[in-house]
Image (cartoon, rainbow, N blue to C red):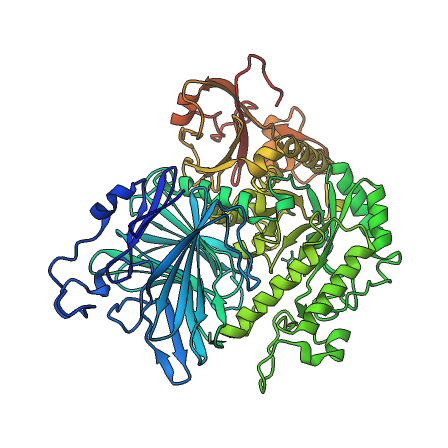
Amino acid sequence: MIEYKDKVFHISAPGMSYMFRADGYGLLEHLCFGPPASMADAAALAVKPGTGWGCAVVLREDDNASCPDVLPLEWSGAGRGDYREAPAELETDDGPVSTDFRYAGYEIIKGCAPIKCGLPQADGGTETLAVTMRDDALKAELKLYFTQFGAAVTRRAELVNLGSRPLYVRKLMSFSTDLAGEYDMHSFSGGWIAEARRTVCHVGMARTVNESVTGFSSNRANPGFMLAEKDAGEDNGRVYGFNLLYSGSHYASAQRSLQGLTRVMQGISPVGFRRKLMPGESFETPEAVMAFSEAGFNGLSHIMHDFVNAHIVPRAWRYRERPVLYNDWEGCMFSFDESRLLDLAARAKKLGCELFVLDDGWFGGRNSDRAGLGDYNVNEKKLPSGIDGLAKKIGRMGLEFGLWFEPEAVNPDSDLFRAHPDWVLAEPGRESLTSRHELLLDLRKEEVRDYIVSSVCGVLDGADVKYVKWDMNRQSCALGTAAHEYILGLYDVLRRIFAPRPDILLETCSSGGNRFDLGMLCFSPQIWCSDDTDPIERLDIQGGLSYLYPQSCMGAHVSASPHAQTLRRTPLYTRGNVSFFGVLGYELDLKDLLPVETREIKAQIAFYKAHRELFQFGEFTRLPAPGDAAGWQVMKNGVAAAGIFRRLVRAAPGYGRVRFAGLSPDKRYRVESRKQSLRVGGFGSLIKYVSPVRISVHGALLRTADKHYAMPDGGDSFTASGRTLLAGFSPAGRFTGAGYDSASRNQGDFGSEIYVISEETGHVKKR
Ligand code: DGJ
């Protein structure tokens, strides 16, 4: 709900109030963003600057307390007495100018106020508050938009040049606000194959910045971040979350002032940015989303997940279950032909997969990553019946068909580049630098966008393609304004291709998670989190992303062990268990599977399908877990599934308790752990202690046994009250070095289990 009275504005939702007012000078004074308050509390919430602040600049000579530098503000000027970081920096032809926007009026609009410049926008907002501010000396107007989406609020800004001379936007943040209190910034940083690692930094009087200047939202600094009180935990304490609906270079900062205010802002990166605004022209920022929770990080995640599921992903895919896919990349790389693909598809179908995805290598001279990118004519040597023929054959097997593209880039060794070397994103007079042997196409150019749209649509309309993987494998070298215009071009291309084809499931990818952001999610319901599919690494990657993004948008695949990036050996059940908490897929050479692995994968897929809605759309909670373990839970309609993932085991393990979340204390629940089995070969020479016959550790007998048989691992099956399960129960015992016992867990390093928790109905469900 949005309320207005006597220049006080109040946006409220259960558990949250956001309030500010226009003060006597027309500055927007921030009153609160936090637990529920009422309009009548405005005076009590307003800061009392006292009698004045010494050397501070004042707005009125006879009002010592009128110093903008010490006020909590929703927007501040530059060069007008507020020396904290300014959200806007503008120039005229004569150079930098000060800004001093004052309140001029407001409007409350039903729903959202549409963005005109082509940036993506959250949809389904209830109401929008548009506050107009004016700087008469500058002859410019600033509109601040606040739209409510349940417990989340989005903000964005629009600057209009009302003068008769050009204005230059050097910096215009989507929002700025001054929160009362002291916080840590939790951001999600990393790089290729190491995305979204949670990093915590205390916000002091030196500025704390989370930014990307790579032209993309980047794998080094996800645009989403949180500000949390020092003592906040997963389930307690005050936490704020912020994110940007934008896929380009971004900037966010937080800085504390002497008065104990934390100024936080976010928007397009100002590095190299200079956008000319002609008289009458306007510039719109991307939309930012913000949310507050008093129930710790999990409370915040629940709000952000609902926001993404309900207001960000394309309508046709909201809460729509995603297929279990097989992707040929890690199994084949560039080396395949139609018969190999059909063989893989037949195997994938038998396992229970629903969608077969042909990744890189199907067109032009694309037999390695050095050539062919840009030439979307099918490689007939590899695929004699073309994409259409292949899709039909795969369709006849009962599988849907999906296809990889990397439309934004071009190899210098390609027909496209030879024909149009001028289509590349380049700075005049400089040699363009390659990355993964490719150059970016200049998506600012209409003819380039037209080429991409017509070549991708040509393929999509020429075959029954149900899924597209849209890849992009390099950073950009474009600076500021050019990088922003590129991103607008990208959104135009995505809109033109996919808006008329809403039922195609789009998964975007950028060398893994180099563009995992809310801007891309407005077009693609899911994103490939990382090229790192090692499940133990994924605990950090998917775990990091889980703070601000729901599991329904994370592509999570089971791949081969030892893993390509870590050489770590992990049990197949753990690879499956981690991938269940995302959109499950398989990405390994299925020809290499042993019978025992085939059985295990079939069981995994059947289990996931039986609980797919729960895993993809259930309320996701990070659980407290014993030792170095991670715990994740999803819950929907009274049923929960929880995963406990251990890293390294210790000898003589203790009795760590397992705790679930969100259950009703007074109800009784049945807890069943998913049946798992242990590879016989994994026990090496220990097998002789349990085998009735003498087995040589290097002999054919053990090798054969390992291919076909697995030993049951221990698990749990019991009932208990919700109260006990919330407080923590004692799970099945673990291997303590004295022998095999099928009732105990015998997992070793990187073991894990999945529990299904359902309200007791009187009968025991099968595991
Ligand atoms: C990078 C992606 O992240 C991979 O999954 C794969 O599609 C390759 N590109 C193909 O070149």
Residue drawn at x 21%, y 68% is: 59
Quarter containing ligand 1? bottom right
Q: Farthest residue in the right direction?
A: 385
Image position of 153 (left or right of 422): left
Q: Nearer the viewer, residue 433 or 288?
A: 288
Up/down of 40 relative to 731, above or below: below
Image position of 729 (left or right of 315): left
Up/down of 112 relative to 636, above or below: below
Residue 362 location (% of width, % of height)? 78, 60
Residue 463 location (% of width, % of height)? 82, 53
Quarter of image, res 27 = bottom left
Q: Is residue 469 visible?
A: yes
Up/down of 300 relative to 522, above or below: above
Q: Farthest residue in the top direction?
A: 762
- Screen quadrant of the N terminus: top left
Q: Nearer the viewer, residue 27 or 182?
A: 27
Q: Nearer the viewer, residue 243 or 477?
A: 243
Residue drawn at x 29%, y 41% is: 37
Quarter of image, res 698 = top right
Residue 221 location (% of width, % of height)? 46, 60
Residue drawn at x 43%, y 24% is: 725
Residue drawn at x 70%, y 70% is: 370
- Screen quadrant of the C terminus: top right
Image position of 252 (left or right of 480): left
Residue 230 location (% of width, % of height)? 29, 47
Disc tally is 0
Q: Is residue 517 visible?
A: no
Q: Nearer the viewer, residue 23 or 334?
A: 23
